[in-house]
Image (cartoon, helix red, strand yellow):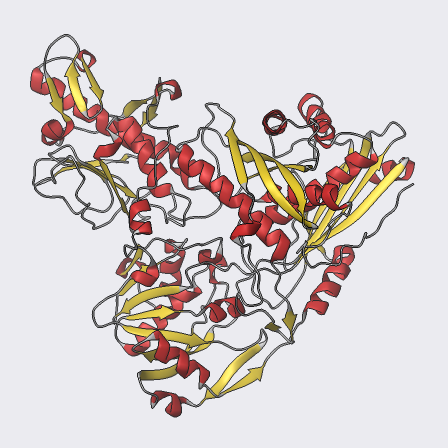
């Protein structure tokens, strides 16, 4: 049994207070001011306490768990409370879940959605909270009955006397636990004893979503609030000079129009924004606002070079050889090994700029007064938004509140806070509450874009077809996608890798599985081609390399666990029946490690009416302990579809600094009929602490897709999007 400390730096992680209705409040370092909905089967407690974040136990036995992290569809609002309920040992049907607001002064871990870190970072804290509550309830019952704690058991929300007939519900004893001191350490359950963790549970907000309940930022309304839309320059490298202000103000339904400047001194990483100077239009409806936007007559000034896609391509090619190396690794003597190699294979891979295209366009509510700011809306980084608004408006952070709504897609776009900062600036100027809403065109032409990449891979084989040399060199606008210490680092005697920086005035930012989504596709495509040149099965070829990394690694370190990496390949090989004769089925495989998790995939592709179609995808995943299998399977399936769609179709081109693609009429996303007919997911069962899951399912999909396409068409795919790119071999040298 694991014991965990509940106190740090002489301050208790948990606090206990009395609810007026007689319940016990176990206060997390989280927050909010919400009333839980009625839970069928339990009466609502007489009264709930309003505190900054907590697990709340009512006198009826109802438990409210406030989720601290933003919900962007990764289902943390279900899985995080499941962890607490497991250690508390309360029936899941007695739990209600609410979204917490921002309070990182008390909460010891950052509140954000990104990097697939929510469960990984919250695992110990969530278990501690549940276990501490359970322990204190046991202690209260022991005192009430004058017995030892060891004479009692707590299970399913009820405390029972082991050698007697007495029992009492959590809600009945909760008030008696309030005066007790928080224990210095509490026991945690062993994984073998889990009853809730590792089960299938539906999304706690699922019924609200499908019945259209107001959950998202676009749903939020406040009496008396104005609506606002913005107009930014038409191209990167331009800014606004003036516009037909008086004419716009006279339009029906328009209340005001003005220029705002959201330039932040000493900007943070989350302040990515190519257009800090904007025209803001205020009105009574989005329809009126969109009509006013069309009537704008603006004088724009060119302040820097207006770039186009051809310039980006040439810059990447130049910087691949001449650019600044940001991170690198070298093992052995790759130059000498390549010179001695019997075969050398060299290939280059590219991917264009991409838009995030969240289904819910950017929006945020702000109510700014002289010295306070209230912010409400969909953000992945509430703390960053709070700090940026504080910098821009000069309002102390303690006078700013950020409440998070459910997010209709993030994919990294809502890591960046410009839309919330703009709402705050507009509210400040107006002196009243305002809700800012972007159009689809506003977001697609503003950025923030996934960078464009170019990487070159090179492999050398000896006369026995052993891999003796490997190099990877990658550049991107602005940073390259190569991870020098990831696979095959540690598995090849002579190895070199370089991540190279470049430059652009186009704003860029993280996109789902940053850099990994491109690197996995390029690397895994290349490894298949090297395996073919070596005359080896692609899975067996990879497993040979993992054996080397596990048994006789090269260099001082590498980032992955070779045994776990090989484990998902072996599992997907078994489940997919790799090697079996399947007429008409063309198979591609890929495996990748990112966000501390391992995913391997096999794609089954057929040719239908002369076009490739993915029939089935087999996925093997090692992410440690799986909290909720329902959500875990769904998120892997979503990652696969997302990876296929963007690899096949997504591309942003630029002419004179302006994005050619402004809406879904020209920017293609995957359609339902283009998705795989079946995606089957298998998890490696172990007791390892949970790791990331929101992003790792996407990267290997790109490589497996490219490899399956080769088997189906006989053609290698080096340049995304696969559906339109000129797929010619680059830098081929076979000797």
Q: Which sits in the foreground, 535 or 657?
A: 535
Q: Quadrant where the N terminus lies?
A: top left
Residue 464: give x, y in percent of width and height.
87, 27
Check the image and name the residue furthest to the front. 609
Q: Which sits in the foreground, 202 or 104?
A: 202
Left or right of 22 on screen, residue 301: right
For the point 48% across and 58% down, which residue is it? 413
Residue 490: give x, y in percent of width and height.
70, 31
Q: Quadrant where the C terminus lies?
A: top right
In this rendering, is residue 28 above or below 490? Answer: below
For the point 59% across and 80% down, which residue is it? 303
The image quarter containing residue 459 is top right
In this rendering, is residue 429 above or below 12? Answer: below
Q: Which sits in the foreground, 263 or 75?
A: 75
The image quarter containing residue 221 is bottom left
Left or right of 335 on screen, residue 504: left
Residue 673: give x, y in percent of width and height.
54, 51
Left or right of 351 on screen, residue 75: left
In this rendering, is residue 525 above or below 300? Answer: above
């Amino acid at each position: 049994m694991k014991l965990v400390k509940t106190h740090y730096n002489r301050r208790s992680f948990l606090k206990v207070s009395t609810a007026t209705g007689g319940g016990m409040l176990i206060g997390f370092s989280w927050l909010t001011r919400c009333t839980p909905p009625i839970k069928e089967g339990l009466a609502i407690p007489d009264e709930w306490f309003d505190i900054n974040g907590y697990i709340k136990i009512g006198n009826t036995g109802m438990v409210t768990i406030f989720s601290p992290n933003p919900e962007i569809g990764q289902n943390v609002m279900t899985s995080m409370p499941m962890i607490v309920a497991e250690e508390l040992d309360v029936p899941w049907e007695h739990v209600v879940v609410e979204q917490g607001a921002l309070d990182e002064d008390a909460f010891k871990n950052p509140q954000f959605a990104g990097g697939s870190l929510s469960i990984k970072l919250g695992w110990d804290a969530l278990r501690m909270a549940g276990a501490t509550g359970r322990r204190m309830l046991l202690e209260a019952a022991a005192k009430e009955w004058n017995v030892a704690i060891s004479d009692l058991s707590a299970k399913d929300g009820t405390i029972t006397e082991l050698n007697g007939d007495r029992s009492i519900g959590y809600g009945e004893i909760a008030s008696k636990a309030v005066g007790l001191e928080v224990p210095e350490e509490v026991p945690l359950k062993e994984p073998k004893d889990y009853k809730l963790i590792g089960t299938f549970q539906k999304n706690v907000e699922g019924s609200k979503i499908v019945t259209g309940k107001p959950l998202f930022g676009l749903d939020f309304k406040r009496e008396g609030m104005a609506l606002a839309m913005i107009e930014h320059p038409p191209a990167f490298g331009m800014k606004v000079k003036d516009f037909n202000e008086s004419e716009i103000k006279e339009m029906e339904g328009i209340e005001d129009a003005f220029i705002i400047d959201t330039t932040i001194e000493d900007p943070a990483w989350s302040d990515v924004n190519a257009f800090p100077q904007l025209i803001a239009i205020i009105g009574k409806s989005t329809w009126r606002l969109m009509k006013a936007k069309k009537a704008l007559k603006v004088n724009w000034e060119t302040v820097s070079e207006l770039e186009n896609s051809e310039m980006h391509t040439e810059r990447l090619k130049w910087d691949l050889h001449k650019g600044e190396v940001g991170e690198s690794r070298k093992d052995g003597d790759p130059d000498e090994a390549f010179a001695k190699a019997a075969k050398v294979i060299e290939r280059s891979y590219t991917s264009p700029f991409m838009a995030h295209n969240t289904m819910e366009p950017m929006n945020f509510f702000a109510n700014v007064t002289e010295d306070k700011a209230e912010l409400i809306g969909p953000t992945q980084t509430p703390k960053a938004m709070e700090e940026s608004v504080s910098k821009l408006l000069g309002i102390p952070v303690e006078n700013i509140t950020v409440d998070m709504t459910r997010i209709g897609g993030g994919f990294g776009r809502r890591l960046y806070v410009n839309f919330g900062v703009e709402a705050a600036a507009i509210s400040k100027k107006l002196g009243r509450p305002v809700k800012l809403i972007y159009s689809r065109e506003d977001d697609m032409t503003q950025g923030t874009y996934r960078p464009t990449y170019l990487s070159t891979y090179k492999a050398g084989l000896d006369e026995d077809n052993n891999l003796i040399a490997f190099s990877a060199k990658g550049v991107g606008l602005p940073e390259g996608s190569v991870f020098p210490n990831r696979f095959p680092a540690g598995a090849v005697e002579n190895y070199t890798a370089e991540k190279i920086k470049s430059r652009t005035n186009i704003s860029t930012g993280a996109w789902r599985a940053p850099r990994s989504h491109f690197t996995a596709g390029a690397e895994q495509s290349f490894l298949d081609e090297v395996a073919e040149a070596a005359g080896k099965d692609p899975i067996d070829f990879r497993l040979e390399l993992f054996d080397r990394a596990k048994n006789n690694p090269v260099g001082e370190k590498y980032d992955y666990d070779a045994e776990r990496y090989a484990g998902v390949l072996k599992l997907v090989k078994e489940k997919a029946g790799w090697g079996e004769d399947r007429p008409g089925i063309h198979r591609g495989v890929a495996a990748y490690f990112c966000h501390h998790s391992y995913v391997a995939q096999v794609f089954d592709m057929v040719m239908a009416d002369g076009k490739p179609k993915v029939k089935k995808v087999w996925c093997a995943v090692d992410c440690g302990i799986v909290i909720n299998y329902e959500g875990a399977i769904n998120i892997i399936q979503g990652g696969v579809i997302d990876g296929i769609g963007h690899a096949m179709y997504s591309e942003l081109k630029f002419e004179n600094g302006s994005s050619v693609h402004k809406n879904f009429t020209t920017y293609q996303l995957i359609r339902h009929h283009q998705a795989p007919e079946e995606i089957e997911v298998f998890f490696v069962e172990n007791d390892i602490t949970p790791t990331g899951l929101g992003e790792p399912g996407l990267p290997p999909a790109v490589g497996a897709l490219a490899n399956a396409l080769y088997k189906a068409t006989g053609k290698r795919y080096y340049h995304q999007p696969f559906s339109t790119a000129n797929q010619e071999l680059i830098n081929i040298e076979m000797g």
